[in-house]
Amino acid sequence: MSGSDILLALIGLGLGGILKGATGAGSPVIGVPVLAVIFNVPMAVAIFTIPNLLTNLWQGWQFRKSQISRRFTLIYAGAGALGAGIGSLLLAFLPGAVLMGVVACVVLLYIAFRLMRPNWHLARPLADRLCAPVGLIGGMMQGAGGISAPVSVTFLNAMRLERGQFIATISVFFCAMSLVQIPALIGLGILTPQIAALSGAAMVPLLGGMPIGAWLARRISKESFDKIILVLLGVIALKLIYDAIL
């Protein structure tokens, strides 16, 4: 790695940490593409696994008192873990680009609907019934395509959760999937001891950015936080479409 590569990686991971600290999600959206430019996609995903697990453990514990419901979170996270395992098995058979393109279009339609109906939200009784199937689909997307946010984050955003509730729930969900993804990558020979060392080093700039994001988030309203999540979803959807076309 050259000096410019190291600087680029530090900036990308630091910005990912700021986004993670502010919203509880989205750090791979910045960090993984930057690392992919320096290395390659499988290696970038592998490097991000350990930081993804540890930062979500940290935020899950930090916001544990903000859980909307322990039962809801455990069902959602458990379904996500199961889906991640299924998605990993189906990885070789699914047309990933087509799948991600369709999901991206659905997310963009959701964003358009929210902009037209800003006061709409997903009622809690319906959300309770949907948490298992949505978690399963999100986990399958994570296992098959490396990203679950278009489903998992969209679902929680539709519930219009407070920032603390959102982070408490999504952190446990991401942790559960990481606990499946890490052994799978080790078994495939992608997450080697050398890459695990790089993954540990990536924790430093990521953790450095998270307090900055948390500080910024404490100074914004619930409405502003909701808009940030919508923007994040929009960026993710556009990236999925770009990847599907190319």
Image (spheres, helix red, strand yellow):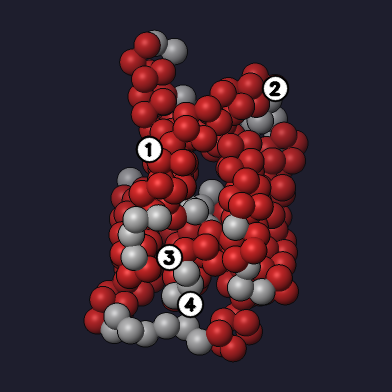
Report the amino acid beneath label 2: Pro
**Are there few (<14), some (14-19), or many (20+) residues within 10 Å of tag 3?**
some
Residue drawn at (42%, 83%) of the image: 121
Residue occupied by mark 2:
193
Q: Position of residue 130 (x, y in %)?
A: 60, 80
Camera-nearest residue between 89 and 6: 6
Query: Considering only order in the chain, which callout, 4 or 3, is on the residue closer to the N terminus?
Result: 3
* Cα–Cα gap, marks 4 and 1: 27 Å
Report the amino acid beneath label 4: Met
* Cα–Cα gap, marks 1 and 2: 26 Å
Residue occupied by mark 4:
159
For residue 237, which quarter of the picture? bottom left
Residue occupied by mark 3:
103
Camera-nearest residue between 219 and 116: 219
* Cα–Cα gap, marks 3 and 2: 34 Å
Residue drawn at (33%, 59%) of the image: 220
Query: Considering only order in the chain, which callout, 3 or 1, is on the residue closer to the N terminus?
Result: 1
- Which one is closest to the eye, mark 3 or mark 4? 4
- 49 relative to 85, above or below: above
- Left or right, 106 with respect to 25, comes to left
Residue occupied by mark 1:
15
